[in-house]
Image: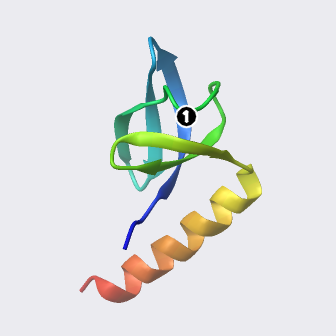
Amino acid sequence: MCLAIPAKVLRVKDGIAEVDFGRGVSREVNIMLVDVKVGDYVLVHAGYAIQVIDEKEAKETLRLWNKILEEELP
């Protein structure tokens, strides 16, 4: 099963973006597959931004993901 996580684009430079997954987690991801700008939300899979998504959809998905994590973690 594949899993893509929404993240907000913080910085963009030379085909790489720093993205924020929330909860203080940020990473650099490859953005060569999508056209993004700072402030956009993307789906990230295996270190690549694979799709730009709507902010409302991204926030709802992150809310649900955080709820799952809260229920699973001790």
Q: Nearer the viewer, residue 73 or 51?
A: 51
* Residue 6 to residue 72: above or below: above
Quadrant in the picture for the C terminus: bottom left
Residue at horizontal 45%, vertical 18%?
Answer: 15
Name the colouring of the figure.
Answer: rainbow
Residue at horizontal 50%, vertical 22%?
Answer: 11
Q: Nearer the viewer, residue 62 or 32?
A: 32
Whole-percent x, y for residue 42 in the image: 58, 44
In the picture, measured across the screen, residue 8 lies left or right of residue 69, that is right
Which residue is identified by label 1? 9
Given the image, on which type of amino acid does mark 1 rest? Answer: Val
Secondary structure under badge 1?
strand
* Residue 23 to residue 72: above or below: above
Whole-percent x, y for residue 41 in the image: 62, 43
Quadrant in the picture for the N terminus: bottom left
* Residue 39 to residue 73: above or below: above
Residue 28 lies in quadrant: top left
Q: Nearer the viewer, residue 29 or 50?
A: 50
Label total for image: 1
Furthest residue to the top? 14
Q: Circle 1: is it few (<14), some (14-19), or many (20+) Cα within 10 Å?
A: many
Whole-percent x, y for residue 56 in the image: 75, 58
In the picture, measured across the screen, residue 57 lies left or right of residue 10, that is right
Residue 34 lies in quadrant: top right
